[in-house]
Image (spheres, rainbow, N blue to C red):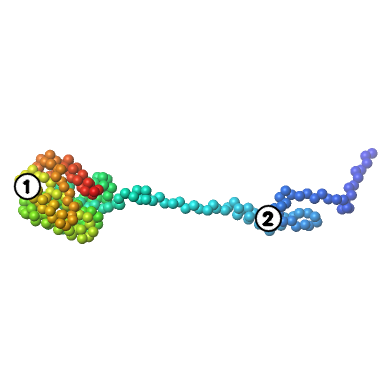
Amino acid sequence: QRKPPKKRNTTGNEDHIKLQNRFYPLINETTVNNEATITKETYDNHNIENTTMYNKKRPEVKKKKRDVRAKNPTRKELRKVLVVGDSMVKRIEDHKLKNSTKHATSVKSINGATTQGMAYHVKGCIKDFHPDILILNAGTNDLKSTKPDVIAQNLIKMAIEASKEGIKVMISTLINRGDDLNSKANEVNDFLYNIALENDIHIIDNGNINLEMLNRGKLHLNRYGSIQLAKNFRNAILN
C-alpha cells in the first residue's frame, strides 16, 4: 500500500520570500500583510505624468518674412499709367504696354477729338482711373482750323490742370504727316518744346516715326508706326 502524502505545515511560522517588482521605484507602496499594493491615486498620477511628458509641444519658431525690396532696392513701385489720345493711339494695346513697362496701363482713344474736346474727356478719364502718369497725344485734328501756338497752349493747359492733382504729365509731339499740314504740325511741336520747358512738362519726341510708318493716306499710323509710338511711350514711362 502506498503511504498518503505528508501534509504541509501551514502554521505561518515558516519564512516567506518577498518578491520585488522591477517597476517598484515608480509606485507608492502600501504594506498590508507584508504585500505591496498599488493605490488608484498612484496609478492615475503615474499616467498623467507620462501623458504630459509625451504631449509637450515644441516651441514654435516664427519664420521671418522675405523682404523682396531689401534684396532689390532698385525695384520700382507699380504705377498707374493713362494714355489719352486721338486716333493715333487706337492701335496701341494697353495690355502690351503694361507687359513692357510692368505698370498698370490704360489707353483711351477719342477719334476725331480736337484739343478742346480732349480736355473734357481727359478730366473724366482721370476721375475713373486715378493715374500716376498721364500721356497726352492730341492736336492733329486741330491743324485745319487752329493756329499752331493755340494748339500748343491748349495741350499745355491740359497738362497743367492734371499736374495740379499730383500727376506726372507727358505730351506726345504731333506725328509727321504726308500732306501740306506737316509744316504746321512741326510748328506746333516747336511751340510745345518752348512752353513745356517753362512749365516743367515732359515732351515725348516722335521724330523717329517717318512717312513709311504711315498708312496709304499718309495721315494715320500703320502697324509699324503704332509699334514705334508704343515704344516711345514705353521709353518715356521707364525713364
Residue sticking out furthest to the right: 1
Q: Residues within 10 Å of mark 2 (few under 14, many from 20)?
A: few
Q: Residue at x 17, y 40 (%)?
A: 224
Is 212 rendered above or below residue 83? above
Q: Residue at x 80, y 50 (%)?
A: 18
Is 220 rendered above or below residue 199? above
Q: Quadrant of residue 214?
A: top left
Q: Residue at x 23, y 59 (%)?
A: 166
Q: Earlier in the sequence, mark 2 or mark 1?
A: 2
| Residue 23 seen in the current view | yes
Please, what secondary structure does the residue beneath circle 2 have?
A: helix
Quick one: 17 or 190, which is closer to the camera? 190
Is 98 rendered above or below residue 160? above
Could you say where residue 107 lies in the image, as x and y percent from the top left?
21, 50
In this figure, which residue is indicated by the disc labeled 1? 183
Q: Residue at x 40, y 50 (%)?
A: 66
Q: Residue type at mark 2?
A: Tyr
Quick one: 69 or 9, which is closer to the camera? 69
Could you say where residue 153 lies in the image, as x and y percent from the top left?
11, 56
Could you say where residue 212 lies in the image, as x and y percent from the top left?
12, 39
Could you say where residue 115 lies in the image, as x and y percent from the top left?
12, 55
* Quadrant (top left, top right, bottom left, bottom right) of the N terminus: top right
Please, what secondary structure does the residue beneath circle 1 have?
A: helix
Q: Residue type at mark 1?
A: Ser
| Residue 215 seen in the current view | no
Quick one: 7 or 223, which is closer to the camera? 223
In this figure, which residue is indicated by the disc labeled 2? 43
